[in-house]
Amino acid sequence: MARILLVEDNEDLAFGLRATLEFEGHDVDVAEDGRAANELLAERPPDLVVLDLMLPDVSGLELLGGLRKAGDRTPVLVLTARAEEADIVMGFDRGADDYVTKPFSTAELLARVRALLRRANGGGGGERRLPVWRFADVEVNPASGTVLRDGSPVTLTPKEFDLLVALLRRSGAVASRSELLREVWGYQNAEIETRTVDVHVAELRRKLEDDPGRPEHILTIRKKGYRLRA
């Protein structure tokens, strides 16, 4: 388990990211601006910082620059909607260790978090071993991002894989559509009307259930959401 400081002023996105990282077993602190981030950096030094560049008081680049000038070498994963090459280069120049551009997949974010923590721990040993989940004849390996059915690879899109992992993490508990929209798709307003989740669930059933019309594992819970019965 690592202590992660998430610096993100978007409440919905911060909620989803915190839930995702906590499901992975990490201890997560959230700061909504630079002032709160600096306080948490001093009070509870993290093992990793996930930093949004667009903050309401100071920019993430200023925060990152100040961190490095003070001699703090904590790994920093920059998280931003900016995709221009100049912004990416500037982030690395200020001392960023890695960079993820919104919108991103949960699998990509977690892979980069794992890589940074592994690097900080000297290549391994300090990172928690991720579980391999199994249900029926399906095996899901979140570390490698692979899915096998009866020993054969199953091709899932990034969002299908993220959705499957989100359901598996809940160990049979129900996930509402709103929760899944925040966690998997990063929707700011997860109460909007959309069939995104339903369409992706249908695809998972088509690829992983014996009879997609009568699923035995990826179940609809009426008026509540979905659950995966392992």
Image (cartoon, helix red, strand yellow):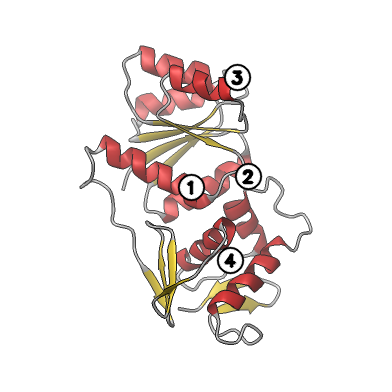
Query: Which of the two discs, 3 and 1, labels the residue nearer the N terminus?
Result: 3
| Closer to us: 67 or 111 | 111
Residue in the picture at 60% in, 87% down: 211
Rendered image: mark on residue 57: 3
Foreground tag (2 vs 1): 1
Mark 1, residue position: 108
| Closer to us: 23 or 151 | 151
Question: Looking at the picture, which amino acid does disc 2 mark?
Answer: Asp
Query: Is disc 4 in contact with disc 3, using a CB cutoff of under 8 Å?
Result: no
SS at badge 3: loop
Question: Looking at the picture, which amino acid does disc 1 mark?
Answer: Glu
Rendered image: mark on residue 12: 2
SS at badge 1: helix
- The answer to whether 123 is drawn above or below residue 205 in the figure is above
Mark 3: few/some/many CA within 10 Å (<14, 14-19, 20+): few
Left or right? Give the position of 122 relative to 176.
Answer: left
User: Residue 124 at what x, y percent from top left?
Assistant: 23, 45
Mark 4, residue position: 175
